[in-house]
Amino acid sequence: MNSTARTHTRGEEELARGNIPKLFVKFVIPGMLALFMLSAQLFIDGLLIGNFIGANAMGSVNLVIPIYDALIACAVVICVGCQCIIGMKLGCDDLQTANDTLRTGLVFALVAIGIAGALVTIFAPELVRLMGANDVLQDDAVTFIRVLAPFFPFPVVMYLFDAVLKSVGRPIYATIGMSAMVLSNVVLDLLFILAFEWGIAGAAFATGLSYLIGLSVYLPALLRKNSPVNLLIGRFKMKLVGKLLTIGSAEGVTELSACVVTLMFNLTMMHYAGEKGIVAFTAINYLNYVMLASIIGMSEGLRSIISYNYGLEAFSRIRKTLRLAMKVTAGFAVVMFSGFFFFGNEMISLFFSHGETDIIALAASGTAILAFSYLFNGFNILTAGVFTSIGQAKYSLLISLLRGCILLFVFLMFLPSFMGIKGIWLTVPLAEVFTFLIGGALYLKKIRRIGERVPAHNGFGHMKKTGSASELSLSRPRNIA
């Protein structure tokens, strides 16, 4: 497809020529804040459910998390695929394919998630039993997932719009939409749980409505005429579905592996510690969301910078971005390890108001061991995200499968048999260490010296081999499609 010259948005100009540290602040920090706020929403959900509905209700929510995560994993595949393709196509001026990608991703996501949500509603009792629910936890689990299921399409579309807005250089707008969703969820939680006393159904209803509110903030930005991608321009193309699924598969596996891991941990905990083990694991999970939010947000924010400059073949800018990201990740690793290792007991205690000392002690013993995983998981998440951003899905998929599914499954099969509950906690840091070794080798071989033997050109015009920002010229468009 031949490209024609067009006027580039300010966001695109910044992606192509902007100072890397400033780009990092503009694109990565909003993504980190948005994910941190999203994790804070889950954290506050946990606090309210644990303190005002009960510890068992919190365990019930954790039992249905794998169902929700499985659906969101499908959404993540589509969203990440859209973001990377749109970023690369905008980088080489293929505006029509960028718009077609948005329309294709939206239609496919709505159909797939709509069908899945209907099936979840119909078969909720059977599903929660499959997730490991006993008689104590089943009723609340069924109530929660049935109230939430009709809202499934809204977070999917919201995440898609969030990814696209970052691709077109509007990360702040995306952050505003995410913030609206988070704040409305907190307010609605307080209203439905405390004021109306709707219990677990109120928590689910608050979550669903907050997604609808967040979506209403995103929508106008993708209907504006001056947006490089617009919901009204593109066409659905079946051939793009395969590309979306391929590129986004690794990130989707990361999300799906979280679903599988939660399920495996729930079943193992139920076997070794009953519902108290489930509740302890749930409290740790809420803390884990907060701890990892910044790293995941950084990985998502980097996608726009890396994929756009990969489309331009501005490889030196990619290397500069990655060096900065690695330094930031190292800093977060130290902070997260220290928090979990030294203050795990205090953080766990926040979720319980009725003196569940045995649950707190069980969970705190886990945080002391799980803390070591934070020395490695940030680098693993970042490496997988970088491979996704440059279209190398197979390496990203390998890293995601190793840390999020394969190694955890192997260790969970053996360690608890010899070490009991301590063996359950050890599975996570061991999986991260082995993944770090493999992912590090791939990074050094495939990414660290990216583009050194490839002549660099620019979708906006011409760029010398060094690929520095000052050497970009926006005068002569070329086709890289």
Image (cartoon, rainbow, N blue to C red):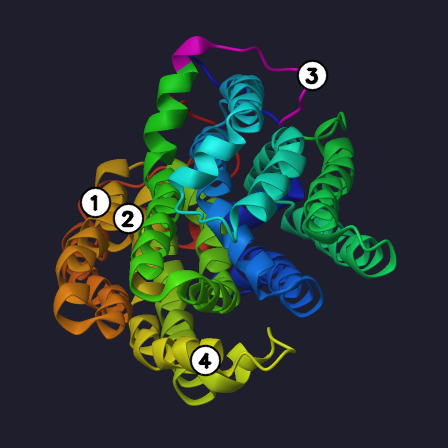
Mark 3 or 4, closer to the camera: 4
Look at the numbered disc 1 and give the secondary structure of its residue.
Answer: helix
Estimate the x, y position of residue 375 in percent, counting from the top left: 31, 75
Give SS at disc 4.
helix
Q: How many residues crowd around disc 1 within 10 Å: few (fewer than 14), some, or many (20 or more)? A: some
The numbered mark at residue 188 is none
The residues tagged by marks 2 and 1 sit, at their Cα atoms, a distance apart of: 5 Å
Residue 234 lies in the magenta stretch = yes
Gap between marks 2 and 4, in whole Å?
34 Å
Q: Give the left or right position of residue 401, taking residue 417 as reference.
A: right
The percent position of residue 237, horizontal first and vertical second, equals 48, 10
In the image, residue 85 sits, relative to residue 63, either above or below, namely above
Q: What span is colored magenta in the figure?
A: 229-239
Q: CA distance from mark 3 to mark 4?
A: 56 Å
> If you read the primary sequence from the N terminus, does the residue marked by circle 1 or circle 4 appear first?
4
To which residue does mark 1 refer?
398
**Where does label 4 land, which residue?**
358
Residue marked by disc 3: 232
The correct choice, above or below, for 426 with respect to 467 in the image is below
Q: Nearer the viewer, mark 2 or mark 3?
A: 2
